[in-house]
Amino acid sequence: MEFKRLYQKYSGMREPAFTLTVNQKSLHSCEDARLETLECELTCRSRAGMLLVQAALNPAGVHGAAWLDAFQPGAACALSVGYGTEKTCVFTGTVFETSWEDPLGGECLRLEAICMDACGLLSCSSMADAGAARTMTQLVNTILGQPACRGLAKTVKRFPADWDLPVYRCGDSDFAVLRAAAEFACYEFYIYASELYFGPPRQNKEVSVAFSGIDGLISLKRRRTLAGQCASVTVTGADDTGTRISYAKKRSQDGGFGAGSVKKALSGTMFQPEAAVHTMAQAQYLAGARMAKREHEGNLLSGRCVGLPEIRPGRFLSLSGLSAPVNGKYYVVSVRHRMDETGFETSFEAEGI
């Protein structure tokens, strides 16, 4: 959607607004519950999303008491942000930790709470049957059955048939085992997570937000780097008879680094042995996915703009009317929505495509 259309949708973006629902209570900033900072960080990388809430409360007030009662560790939490009555839910998760700074005789008590998204809850979980063998479908169903995931589970229509390989427990969290098993089953966890948490995966390149010129943008920085680049990625393993499996995926493009010199500079091969790779198909998929990841990470964009709930991890944005090195389409990998007394801003990191 063009930024000018979003500007019209949000009536000029003059009134930042939020709705924070915790423990089935809708909380708002008011006289006895003054919000200081509301910061939401989301990512499709392998770390949890987080919501940080800082507020000054009057425990004797009706609304201040409601805030204190709602923020209990383990409580369900959801955040919607926008302008006026036009708000979009950008976070669902669980209250992970709360702290209160007592004024010791003053008027306001300061609340600080950290909430983790469903991804974060999985990172902290650990099933009791460590060492048992389960299939991927059983593991995924167990995870999606947790309270924080029930809403997300409705978006999963069916599981790929070849996910049903044994998953051996080694004491890791469910999240870590799911990520590893998804890789070995020829499905990158990050693609699955993008679909589960953030909508369509990378193959759908429909642009969610388009900036034409500087309107709506506060800052932009594009970084091109050879760090992490290589000529090819080779994944090795062994089949059931012990025969060695090896597949090398070469760079598909030089990414603008300089066709003449980059091949000489990036002549090395990254070898990645994988004990759980038992078929050539698995080796081919992993080698291709990991080379693509390296290529994308060499072309990064970071920026800030006015608060836009539409910018989410797993989606695409485009830039035009700016300098030649910056114009183009990008895949959003992390987003930070921040709302405080100065207004509502969105920061993002994106990979060039």
Image: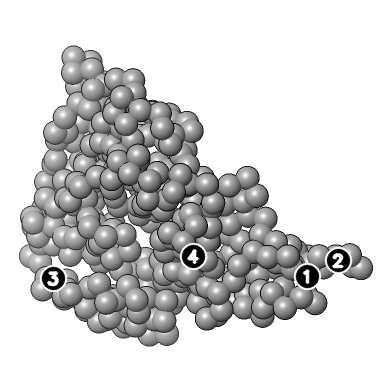
Q: Real-space Cα distance between discs 2 and 3?
A: 57 Å
Q: Real-space Cα distance between discs 3 and 1?
A: 52 Å
Say which quadrant the C terminus sits in: top left
Q: Residues within 10 Å of mark 4 (few under 14, many from 20)?
A: many
Residue at 49% x, 51% y: name it: 337
* Pointer 4 or 1: first along the chain: 1
Q: Is residue 311 left or right of residue 266?
A: right
In the picture of the structure, the residue carrying the numbered disc 1 is 58
In the picture of the structure, the residue carrying the numbered disc 4 is 79
Q: Residues within 10 Å of mark 1 (few under 14, many from 20)?
A: many
Question: What secondary structure is marked by label 3?
Answer: loop
In the depicted view, which residue is nearer to us: 127 or 348? 348
Q: Real-space Cα distance between discs 4 and 3?
A: 32 Å
Counting from the top left corner in percent of width and height, residue 115 is at 54, 66
Question: What secondary structure is marked by label 1?
Answer: loop
Are discs 1 and 2 less than 8 Å apart at CB?
yes
Q: Is residue 297 left or right of residue 338?
A: left
Question: What secondary structure is marked by label 4?
Answer: strand
In the picture of the structure, the residue carrying the numbered disc 3 is 160
